[in-house]
Image (cartoon, rainbow, N blue to C red):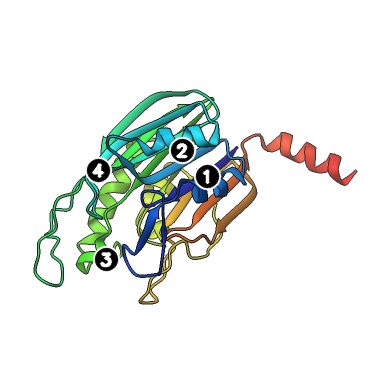
Amino acid sequence: MKVISWNVAGFRRAKTLATFDYSEIDYDYFSNKIASFNPDVICLQEVLIGEIDQMEVMAKKLGYEYWKSVKMSPDHTGKDDWIGLGIISKEVIDDTQIEVLPYPTFKLVFPDGREAQKFDKLILKAKIGDVAVATTQLQPLHYWGYNYYETPGYEYGREISKLIAGLINNETVLTGDFQFSRTSLVFKELYGDIQLKDSLPEVFTRKRENGKHTISDHIFIPSAGVVVDSRVEETMTDHFLCFVDFSQNVSRLEEMKKLVKG
């Protein structure tokens, strides 16, 4: 199964590493990058949904029949749209489930004293063939001087971990923009109880002007899955394209390897 996860920022390329320094919408750039991997499933974060649903536009450009989108919160870059999550698939998308993630109970205040507008974050889950696929985006706590490793961000992250663990099982592919690198320190249920594993190489998926680069994006797969190919493609965007090709049929994969060697 070939899976892409990508925070596409409304399908806008990044002009520089500065926050929100975007180009105009460029569907061709993103569709060409995605098509080059020939994925079975594409999980996207920060798609724009308004009079035009970008998920529908991208699905049609790629020639994929099945797609699902969900509005999440008003677009933080000022456009009169909502940002959302989406899944595009070669196969039928069934059993869609949407869950609102908890909002921080501590105040989110910018350095200039402005309190943040409340933007909810969601998780979108669906069934594609025999596999459950979920995608999400967490709150960017670093904007307000917090992180997911220390109080109160750590307790907030643990709350999210428990909620997600109640929604998925050990046969789920979980993707998204998680906003921080060392997920094993916070998402203990995903690694322990659910037994998923992060399939991506340990390289930065987001680079920032201040040099505080992070592995913000992750693709978790079942622990029994065998990774055939796994890449973070450094693109002209604030988040990079993340890709994994994995097999759930371990015995069949071993047979194929023997045939190739023979």
Query: What whole-number distance in Å separates the C-alpha atoms at marks 4 and 2?
Result: 17 Å
- Who comes first in sequence, dot 2 or dot 3? 2
Q: Nearer the viewer, residue 104 or 238?
A: 238
Query: What whole-number distance in Å separates the C-alpha atoms at marks 1 and 3?
Result: 30 Å
- Who comes first in sequence, dot 1 or dot 3? 1
Q: Nearer the viewer, residue 232 or 133?
A: 232
Residue 170 appears in the picture as rendered: no
Query: What whole-number distance in Å separates the C-alpha atoms at marks 4 and 3?
Result: 24 Å
| SS at circle 4 | loop
Residue pointed to by mark 3? 142
Q: Nearer the viewer, residue 202 or 14?
A: 14
Screen quadrant of the C terminus: top right
Which of the 4 image quadrants contains residue 140?
bottom left
Per the rendering, the mark at residue 31 is: 1
Residue pointed to by mark 4? 81
**Number of other residues with Cα within 10 Å of mark 3, as a class: few under 14, some 14 to 19, many 20 or more:** some
Location of residue 229 in the rendering, given as x and y in whole percent from the top left corner: 65, 50
Screen quadrant of the N terminus: top right
Residue sitting farthest toward the right: 262
Query: What whole-number distance in Å separates the C-alpha atoms at marks 2 and 3?
Result: 30 Å
Q: Name which residue type carries label 3.
A: His
Location of residue 12 in the rendering, given as x and y in whole percent from the top left corner: 40, 54
Describe residue 130's horizontal placement relative to residue 183 as left or right. right
